[in-house]
Amino acid sequence: MTQTLNISEDTALRIADISLGMRVDRASAVLAGAQAIFTVYGGNVLVTGFYGEIMVLIDGANRLTLTYDADTGATDTVLGSQGADIDTFIAGRMIYLPAAAGALTNTATAGACPLDVAENWVLPPGHMDLTSTGTTTLGKIRWSIFYVPLEPGAYIA
Amino acid sequence: MPIYNQSTLENVAALNQGIRVDSAAALVTAAAVTKFTVSGGNVCMLGFYGMVTVQIAATATTVIVTHTPTTGTASILAILAGASDIQGFVPGRVAYLASFGSILTWTATGYGILHPAAGTRYILRPGALSVTGSAAPATGTVKWSMFYVPVDPGAYVTGS
């Protein structure tokens, strides 16, 4: 192994926190209509990265839309939506947000995926919802979001 | 002006740019050669570059970079179409990933660009990041470096 530093796992994760923002994971789960996947509490946060990873082959017709429902305000914000059905997408294909309010984009392959959202978004307290046009029996996706608080006490769960 | 010891400098660099992993200088070959291996979970690649360390022989050669996950289909990080012929390239010329899935870009002189593209960091799943030449120049070596942070606990990258 050629590696400059011998870094413990914990140290490596803290370096990741500093570099990417704090990571929050939403466990791998089947698609089942509308689901809140992340919730912002306590104040505004800045989203620095976001992606999903198919963990089990998608076994049903589905098209995903990601919206943000702020605690105050009547209208949800569409963060991204898929233009095509993801049925039969294999494990390892990933989903990302290259542009604000743009397409929720699928990688064509299973190896690599951009992490950044085009702009770093400010999210007020509320919840991020994932809506699928169908459901899956076995097919699962996990999601990760990276953020930093903009106000004291703000966090994502 | 403060004077820092080597370990402090390297730790500051790790905090600033991610953890550096190197792949030893080697000949470019016509087969895929693994330069970095991702293990234990997903990582985020913050930077990537290669540098010619011994002048490349006069053999027409282009280079692509591929990430092949342990399970699933490979991603071409740098496509072949439009790639530079590196024959005769002198030591110090640097290759970098201009953007996701575009051509591997070589600088004309001894400088480089570390980050794949403005604001673009790659999630890499466990697997192998390899470099493949279209030919195998008899002489001429390139060394590669990757900068990363783990995404999943326990994920790491090794160089070869």
Image: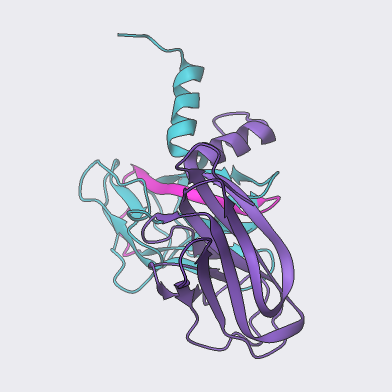
- The span picked out in magenta is B39-61
Left or right, B86 with reference to A94: left
Q: Position of residue B99 (x, y in %)?
A: 35, 61
Between A117 and B138, the one nearer to me in the picture: A117
Left or right, A59 with reference to A67: right
Asked if A151 appears above or below B13 in the picture, the reply is below
Q: Colour of chain B?
A: cyan
Q: Tell me which chain appears purple.
A: A
Between A44 and A58, the one nearer to me in the picture: A44
* Residue A4 visible in the displayed image: yes
Asked if A5 appears above or below A25 in the picture, the reply is above
* Residue B32 visible in the displayed image: no
Q: Position of residue A145 (x, y in %)?
A: 56, 56
Residue B60 in the magenta stretch? The answer is yes
Between B133 and A61, the one nearer to me in the picture: A61
Q: Position of residue A131 (x, y in %)?
A: 60, 78
- Residue plotted at (27% across, 51% down): B89
- Residue plotted at (55% across, 35% down): A15
Asked if B38 appears above or below B19 in the picture, the reply is below
Asked if A41 appears above or below B99 in the picture, the reply is above
Instruction: State the quadrant of the N terminus of chain B.
Output: top left
Between A39 and B64, the one nearer to me in the picture: A39
Report the colour scheme.
Answer: by chain
